[in-house]
Amino acid sequence: MTEVANNNINIKSDLNVTTLKVSENDKQLALDVLNKTPLPTTRVEAWKYTRVAKLGKIDFTNNKATLNDVSSYLIDDTKCSFVFVNGHFSEALSSQEIPSGVSIRTLSANPSELNNSTIKLEGEVFNALNTAFLNDGVQIDIAANAIVETPIQVIHILKGDNIMSNFKMMINASKSSQATITQGFFCESGENNFCNSTSEISVGENAVLRIEKIQYESEKTFHISTEQVKQEKNSNFGINTFTLNGALVRNNLNIDVNGQNCETHLNGAYLLKNKQHVDNHTIVDHKVPNCESHELYKGVIDDNSTAVFNGKVFVRPDAQKINAFQSNGNVLLSDSASINSKPELEIYADDVKCSHGSTTGQLDEEAVFYLRARGLSEKSARHLMVAAFIGDVLDKITNENVKTFTHNILKERFDWDF
Amino acid sequence: MITIKNLHAKIEDKEILKGLNLEVKAGEVHAIMGPNGAGKSTLASVLAGREDYEVTEGTVDLDGEDLLDLSTEERAWAGLFLAFQYPVEIPGVSNINFLRTAINETREHKGQEPISAKEFMAMVREKSALVELDAKLASRSVNEGFSGGEKKRNEIFQMAMLNPKLSILDETDSGLDIDALRIVANGVNKLKSDNNATIVITHYQRLLDYIVPDFVHVLYDGKIVKTGGKELALELEEKGYDWIKEEIAQ
């Protein structure tokens, strides 16, 4: 067992430092960071609207758990599906028909030491925690020129109480490859569970990579994700993040656009009710010229829930001819729902086309009245308006199975028929 | 069809309707005219159930149902239709999808089966032709990017689709050029039957050349103060409302 600072995450004696082949440098650095870094407070700018103090009060553990049936969590009916429970790979629940041109290995089955982390560890408690206490994860390599039609699915399920799962995805999309990865986070049962997930994604030259990410844990589950993406020239990367449940969800999406002529698409929808809190922090860093990025995040926020959107776009001094568009829209369905939206542009080049915008409002009551006057029940009228609002983000899902799955969740959780 | 007795309504603390009486029978067309601020649009809003207005006195009976006791959608299910003075633009909500939901909810309320896709589409084709509304417009987002005339034609298209018992046209003619006006009026006339009725609220006598009313009422200061035939509209057009105000003052 390892002691970590008192003002930090409580690590019970049965929680062990990772036995995976994490690079020794990273492991030491991560432990060091954990020892000297407290949990962020709202005085830290990046955590201004998101309180994580509660995570410091839970005695976390990590038990393995088994599930009899995983079918309700399978987003796609693909035969290439990797399932993890509490961060541990479940061979029984997975199906490993790996498409040609793809190599997938769990990190625990990886014979050699993992590469040094591309994720920042200094000062980053959750990344350090993920590194030092990594349970397992997958490494997905897409070979050069491989066009992978079969979606690759990675599912993470929490089960138990006070479980902390540190999970990782490493994706390497080689030159001129094309692939789609579906990622789902769920919770079978229990309270005070915490999924701390990181992804390191490399999109090679001329590669196309799409990720569909669905977060549907529980109102008693904490979730923090960090995705570190780097794009090489002529590549096209897109991620759709749908946050449909979770007590506290924080997503950090960091995109380094390192090569010219890249396209980046970030879309997200967050639908909250009760006391949920969802925080999306995105950074797109345009370091070189002639690239475009498109970002669309929309939220529907009900009851006493709160959402945060912080989207930052950097355009570095020599990154001319950048088209960067960012938009965040929110609908508040109750008087006590709230959103903190902060779109930011930092532009150091002078020949660029960039825009950002944020809107927050309520449903247009005049429109609701209009629909009701035509014979729609108030409920249908409001659903229709919500569907219309969130529809353009949902339309970004290209995979029909993912779309159907998402719609089923919306029906199940919100009784919304879209 | 509809009997309005001693209707009083206020918005915030301002009383707008001050004892309005009106009876409309099946097969009839009634025009309501009156100066600005008389309460014409308030009447339409109160009948449709807009929540900003509070009814303080009076009754409204629609074929035996206490209209004021119903929610907005229940009024629609009971056969009331309001063509809005300012039709609302609703981005992202498809015109025909929402109409289909509206029709099916009405049917469900009446214990009927939902309309089949085939039957519905045939109806869309037939009814959109009635108001010369481009089929493409019919399937776009509700009123989004429509011209003023298209919005009003869309109102009548929806009226045709919903086949109401009582239609209230709230200044449907305002701002229309003569071609659009003819199209709208023609649509309304074609939908007219012995089983339905229409209340036309307007500022302008011109509309009544196309939709010929059986009765013309003058609404002034929250009450119907004068009722006549279609010739009353001509008189109002010519002489304005001052003579009526004087008549009342006496």
Image: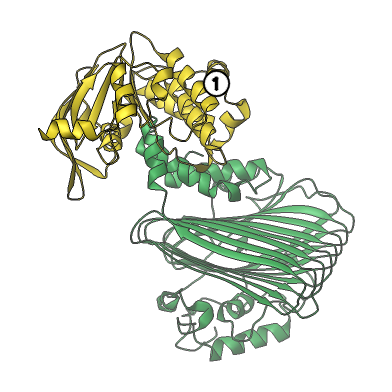
Q: Which chain is yellow?
A: B
Horizontal and vertical percent for residue A18? 63, 76
Horizontal and vertical percent for residue A327? 59, 61
Q: Relative to residue B195, is residue B67 drawn left or right? A: left
Q: Is residue A156 visible?
A: no
> How did the renderer colour the structure?
by chain
Quadrant housing residue B210:
top left
Q: Which residue is mark 1?
A: B124
Camera-side residue: A106 or B49? B49
Q: Is residue A383 visible?
A: yes
What amino acid does circle 1 point to? Val
Among all residues in the image, which is located at the extreme top? B194
Camera-side residue: A319 or A411? A319
Q: Is residue A58 above or below residue A191?
A: below
Residue located at (85% from left, 56% from top): A177
Q: Relative to residue B164, is residue A391 drawn left or right? A: right
* Helix, strand or loop under label 1: helix
Q: Which chain is green?
A: A
Horizontal and vertical percent for residue A404? 59, 40
Q: Quadrant of the N terminus of chain A?
A: bottom right
Q: Is residue B22 above or below residue B223?
A: above
